[in-house]
Image (cartoon, rainbow, N blue to C red):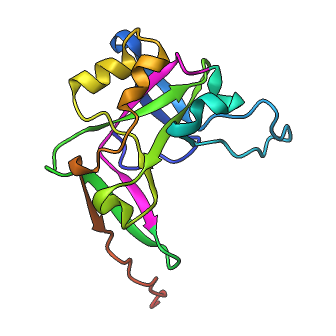
Amino acid sequence: MPALVRPTDAALVIGSRGQFRLLRFGVLAAWGDTSGTQKPVINARSETLRDKPLFRGWLEQRVAVPMAGYDEWQGDDKRLHHVGPHDGEGPLLAAALWDGGERFCLLTCAADGAMAEIHHRMPVFLPDAQAADAWLGPYPFAQAQGVLRPHSGMLHAAPAPVPLPAQGRLL
């Protein structure tokens, strides 16, 4: 599993019936910039999926993204935190939507607990096999959406080490 997946990078996702796909992180809006410089949409608010035309058509194309953790920036001074499983084991399984082609976007929810101190949003994680089955199973979105809530109790955040300033060449 890569240490860090950035928007437009390829990532392994799990679809219904346990199918694996290699998809690009970030979906493109059909009405977006056609010059080739369009920025992908990497996150979707789980609370408003049904209200947004971009996501409404993908509600039955649910996938999950296994990850060791993620990085989150905190505050105006942009302090970096590494967020991962509380028990140090993984992987985490994040809820996502697939565009039916080559791309996916992660779902977010309001952060709670210790995560709210770092950022007001967080990825939606599927905390156990029952939640994963509810999200990835053949159930309609109306039934599956119950898992789209914070699960910060399963997470641990630690400030990333501050990098040393670049040292000039001595010779």
Report whether 2 appears left or right of 53: left
State the residue at coordinates (42%, 60%). 72
Q: Position of residue 67 (x, y in %)?
A: 33, 40
State the residue at coordinates (38%, 82%). 164
Say whether residue 59 is magenta: yes
Q: Give the range drawn in magenta.
A: 58-73
State the residue at coordinates (24%, 22%). 130
Say whether residue 24 is magenta: no
Report whether 88 appears left or right of 82: left
Location of residue 12 (image quadrant) = top left
Residue furthest bottom as drawn: 170
Residue furthest right as drawn: 35
Location of residue 68 (image quadrant) = top left
Work out whether 40 lies above or below 70.
Answer: above
Work out whether 166 lies above or below 35.
Answer: below
Q: Position of residue 25 (x, y in %)?
A: 54, 37
Q: Which of 6 and 62 is in front in this view?
A: 62
Q: Where is residue 8 in the image (x, y as percent from the top left)?
A: 59, 41
Q: Main secondary structure of the magenta part?
A: strand
Report whether 109 appears left or right of 59: left
Count of numbered circles on the image? 0
Location of residue 165 (image quadrant) = bottom left
Q: In which quarter of the image is the N terminus?
A: top left
Q: Position of residue 148 (x, y in %)?
A: 40, 34
State the residue at coordinates (36%, 67%). 117
